[in-house]
Image (tube, helix red, strand yellow):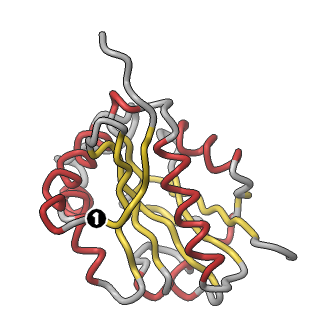
Amino acid sequence: MGMMTKTQYVREIRTNEYEALGRLMVDVYSNLAGFPGPDEQPGYYDMLRSIGCFSERDGARVLVAISADDELVGGIVYFGDMAQYGSGGIATTVKNASGIRLLGVSARARGMGAGKALARACIQLAKDKGHSHVVLHTTQPMQVAWSLYEKLGFERSKDLDFAQEGLPVFGFRLWLGEK
């Protein structure tokens, strides 16, 4: 088995990568043990498949992680305007915050720092905007992401919790600078 190379860099998605990232996302999420499959939440998977379209929303950006051998190995969506965030619960009304959604890293690139690099790039965009905090959601099956967010300093924020067609979804916040 060839050694996977570390993440080389994070950049904005290109139009010709929409489809590849969509496939990667569907693959990642449908293989999470305990996470609803495409047959259970078809609308959610349609959204994953068309993840590139988020870059057309106001203040939103889709970022991709590129490996040292020039392969697209992950993606994330950054929201500079929470009104565009599109989740359940109160998150879309949160002021002075950026949002992160849909972090996904291909199975063969795990542990290479792609997830961390993508999340950090979003945190930097939030700082550049002068926002006071970053909001995100995760679920119980997403243990890898959950622990990554905690390592980056995100704290559970129960006021942001909601249920997505019966699946409990848990809110997190990262405070930037002084609380």
Circle 1 packing at 10 Å, graded few (<14), some (14-19), many (20+), is some
Q: Secondary structure at mark 1?
A: loop
134 is higher (above) or lower (below) than 57:
above
Quadrant in the rendering for residue 13: bottom left
Residue 142, position as x, y percentages in the image: 49, 41
> Residue 33 vs residue 169: left or right?
left
Residue 115, position as x, y percentages in the image: 49, 46
Residue under the image location 53 percent in, 60 percent down: 137
Quarter of the picture holding the N terminus: top left
87 is higher (above) or lower (below) than 3:
below
Residue under the image location 40 percent in, 35 percent down: 34
Residue under the image location 32 percent in, 37 percent down: 106
Query: What count of labels does the image hold?
Result: 1
- Residue closest to the far top: 1
Residue under the image location 50 percent in, 82 percent down: 80
- Residue closest to the far right: 178
Quarter of the picture holding the C terminus: bottom right
104 is higher (above) or lower (below) than 102:
above
Residue 127, position as x, y percentages in the image: 65, 76
**Residue 144 vs residue 9, the one in the foreground:** 9
Residue wearing tag 1: 13
- Residue type of the residue flagged with mark 1: Ile
Residue 68, position as x, y percentages in the image: 36, 38
Quadrant in the rendering for residue 102: bottom left
**Residue 51 vs residue 38, the one in the foreground:** 51
